[in-house]
Image (tube, rainbow, N blue to C red):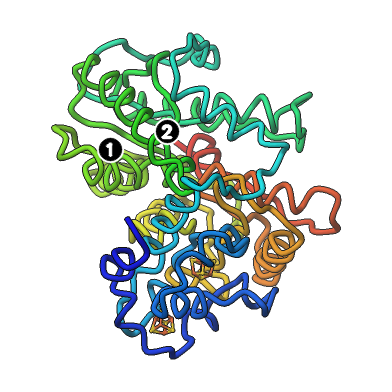
Amino acid sequence: MNSEAIVKETRAYHCLECGVCTSSCPVARVRPSFSPRLLVEKALFGFGDEIVRDRDLWSCLVCGRCTSRCPSNVDYLNFIKEMRIEASKLGEKGLFSHDGILNTIMELQSLSLRQKRTSWITDDLEVADEGEWFYFVGCLPYFDLVFGEGGYCDVGLKPTERARNTVRILNKMGIKPVVSNDERCCGHDLLWNGDLEGFRRLAELNLKTIEKSGAKKVICLCPEGYVTLKRDYPSYLGEQDIEVVQLYQLLADKLKEGKLNFVENGSDNPVKVTFHDPCSLGRIAEIYEEPREILSGIPGIELVEMERNRADALCCGTSGWVNCSSCSKQIQTERLKEAEATGADILLVACPKCGIHLSCAKYNSDIKIEIKDITDLIVEKMA
Ligand code: SF4
Ligand code: SF4
């Protein structure tokens, strides 16, 4: 798509030059030279060639704050995505964090390879090769290699514990999900980093794997995986005969049906928690209340909101494993301090990547608040 077509497709020609996008942008607040408004203006005035060579094209966190607030409904997120696809054709890329190891892992998964991605499944977990529900695990098994003990960038995390939690919770709901060794990365990061062909290859491989399992329902813990399978697979590969469900939607329903129960609290003192809305779960998928409904159902848990919550929530500071910078660290530190200011003991996260990014910022800092994935809490408290 050339820049004229991108302007048309994303309604950029409706831009009022109001600057709401720039004033809403967490990157622009830290780095005033970054201006989403200016990028849109450049495209409007026919300087698309400059945009695709502009390093700032890769500084956007695709957090969606600008898109959600734009009074003219300019689809800035898709504007960035399409511009990156064009830039990528010219060989332009973002600056990969962690020496590009995660990007390499994602690219490799889009090719013909043999994986060993299910060794995280422990004996207590019930999984199947075929069935009604497919649990889309995403890149969690690979994150362990990078961020786990002895990993390439060891920040003391165990990302695959989130996958085990998901299966434990599903088993408790009477669901024995399919978990496949042939699954690949969902393609979210390749798509948003401009690699459309890589994304397509991953999507095609995943759809074949899901079809082979006989599953008609796909459950995702990772909000980015959820949005990618639910919105982007149909948009790029046509409508699919599968229902894509986010774990917290399912659990909120089960709670209402009385099929998700929690143990009584043994203490009079509630544990104070605060909740970080991931951009993909919140602003993109508009799933705000379900995690809160689940938390309100757990005895002894008191939720205290951060000043910026739901559609106003601050991003966790980096996206797609590109351009993780001092700007990212400032945004992450600001978010952690906002969480501490609530007086909460625990900052709950609902996205494995948010957990990684915020934990990384906490590492070697004097920030004390405990960071915990909601699935950890659910598994601890499930009756
Ligand atoms: S918020 Fe929307 S209308 Fe205002 S400058 Fe940004 S893109 Fe243009
Ligand atoms: S998506 Fe987020 S980071 Fe990117 S320009 Fe908009 S507000 Fe800024």
Which numbered disc flags the more N-terminal residue, 2 or 1? 2
Label 1 Cα neighbours within 10 Å, binned few <14 / some 14-19 / many ≥20: some
Type of amino acid at the residue the image marks with label 1: Lys
Label 2 Cα neighbours within 10 Å, binned few <14 / some 14-19 / many ≥20: some
Mark 1: C-beta under 8 Å from nearest atom of ligand 2? no
Q: Is 314 situated above or below 373?
A: below
Instruction: Kindly report which numbered mark, 2 or 1, lies closer to the viewer in this rendering.
Output: 2
* Residue pictured at 66% horizontal, 31% vertical: 101
* Residue pictured at 55% horizontal, 46% vertical: 320
70 left or right of 371? left
Q: Is 45 situated above or below 255?
A: below
Mark 2: C-beta under 8 Å from nearest atom of ligand 2? no
Type of amino acid at the residue the image marks with label 2: Gly
Q: CA distance from mark 2 to mark 1?
A: 40 Å
* Disc number for residue 198: 2
Q: Which residue is mark 1?
A: 259
Point out residue 74 in the picture as x, y percentages from the top left corner. 33, 75
Residue 206's quadrant in the figure? top left
11 left or right of 348? left
Q: Does residue 65 show up? A: yes
Quadrant in which the N terminus is drawn: bottom left
Element under disc 1: loop
Point out residue 301 in the picture as x, y percentages from the top left corner. 53, 55
Q: Does residue 269 show up? A: no
Point out residue 48 in the picture as x, y percentages from the top left corner. 45, 67
Point out residue 56 in the picture as x, y percentages from the top left corner. 60, 64
